[in-house]
Amino acid sequence: MNIRKSLDNILKKYGYDLIYIRRDKRFKCSCYSERSSGQTSSSCNKCFGTGYKVAIEKIRSRRKIAPLTESLVRAGRNYEIGNVSGTAFLYFIQHDVKPKKGDILLEVEWKNGVPFKIKEKHFISIADPKHGAGGRIEFYQVYVKYDTERPGDENALT
């Protein structure tokens, strides 16, 4: 059984396109400030507020709601109405994407094959490689945490 081919078929049938923001930690963005202990401009339209040069890629994926253990530190938050746990998502991503912790996944609206509006922004918390026979990475299970959009994020898409 070829797991990579099986996932490819599943994503062709049930997946959808996302924007993957890959940080290149070798190069700092012009908004990065050494004097301010690495502060970055949250509204930077070049780096999505990461402080690093980024590459924008279109990938195909599928997501599901991930089980979130109540005992995880900071998994729940106390509000006036009580303790509320956030929703966590799990993305299935092909082996050649090679996702990394701290990179960003954007759920976007598409118009004529071009992203024009960000619906959701997620930081990768865990990129868990799934190995097959002989230790080859077949695909990644990627756990993400939600992040609020920054003012310059929409501009960075173009």
Image: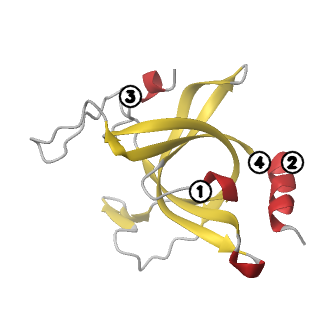
Mark sitting earlier along the chain (3/2): 2
In the foreground, 15 or 85: 15
Q: Amino acid at mark 1?
A: Lys
In terms of secondary structure, where does tag 1 sit?
loop
Q: Is 8 situated left or right of 42 in this image? A: right
Position of residue 80 measured from the top left corner of the image (x, y, whole percent): 30, 58
Point out the frontmost of discs 3 and 4: 3
Point out the frontmost of discs 3 and 2: 3
- Inter-mark Cα distance, 1 to 2: 22 Å
Inspect this view and state whether residue 32 appears: yes
- Inter-mark Cα distance, 4 to 2: 6 Å
Q: Amino acid at mark 4?
A: Gly
User: Residue sitting at 32 percent across and 29 percent down?
Assistant: 44
Q: Give yes or no for contact between labels 4 and 2 (Cβ–Cβ under 8 Å).
A: yes
In the foreground, 128 or 82: 128
Position of residue 24 measured from the top left corner of the image (x, y, whole percent): 41, 45
Q: Amino acid at mark 3?
A: Lys
Mark sitting earlier along the chain (1/4): 4
Q: Amino acid at mark 2?
A: Lys
Point out the frontmost of discs 1 and 2: 1
Which residue is the site of mark 4?
Answer: 15
User: Residue sitting at 87 percent across and 54 percent down?
Assistant: 9
Which residue is the site of mark 3?
Answer: 46
Which residue is the site of mark 1?
Answer: 98
Q: Give yes or no for contact between labels 1 and 4 (Cβ–Cβ under 8 Å).
A: no
